[in-house]
Image: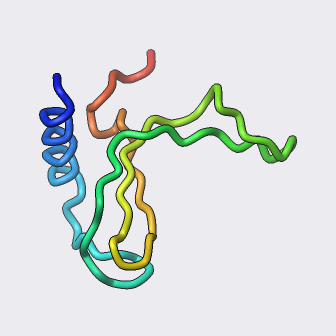
Amino acid sequence: MDDAARGELIIERLREYWTRPQTCAACGTSEWDMVGETFLPRWKAEERTTDFGHGVPAVALICKKCGFMVFFSCESLGLIGKKP
C-alpha cells in the first residue's frame, strides 16, 4: 500500500472511531493536522529514562491553532495486527 492509500485508510478509520465532536480540548477549535503514524516510546519513571525499544504505535493529530496533540492506537484503529 502506498503512502497516499495508507493516509486515506487512516482518515477512514479515524472517522469511524472518532464520532464525538472533533474539537480541541485545549482551545475549542476543530482544525487538525495529521502527522500520521508515529511511535510513542515508553517512559520508565523509576529510572527517569525513555525506553525507545518499547512503546505504542500511534496516529498523531495536532491542533492547528494551539498545538494540542491527540493520539490513537494503530492497533485499535486496525492499522496493525493485535499482539498474541
Residue at image coords 39%, 51%: 60
| Residue nearest the viewer, comparing 29 with 77 | 29
Q: Position of residue 40 (x, y in %)?
A: 54, 42
Q: Residue furthest right?
A: 47
In the displayed structure, would residue 68 be above or below residue 34?
A: below
Quarter-of-image position of residue 7: top left
| Residue nearest the viewer, comparing 64 with 69 | 64
Q: How is the image coloured?
A: rainbow
Q: Residue furthest front?
A: 3
Residue at image coords 28%, 31%: 79
Residue at image coords 44%, 15%: 84
In the displayed structure, would residue 46 be above or below residue 34?
A: above
State left or right for residue 18 relative to residue 27. left
In the displayed structure, would residue 11 be above or below residue 5?
A: below
Quarter-of-image position of residue 21: bottom left
Quarter-of-image position of residue 83: top left
Q: Position of residue 63 (x, y in %)?
A: 36, 70
State left or right for residue 39 relative to residue 60. right
User: How many labels were placed on the picture?
Assistant: 0
| Residue nearest the viewer, comparing 48 with 18 | 48
Q: Residue furthest top?
A: 84
In the displayed structure, would residue 82 be above or below residue 45?
A: above
Q: Position of residue 81 (x, y in %)?
A: 33, 21
Q: Position of residue 74 (x, y in %)?
A: 35, 37
Residue at image coords 16%, 22%: 1
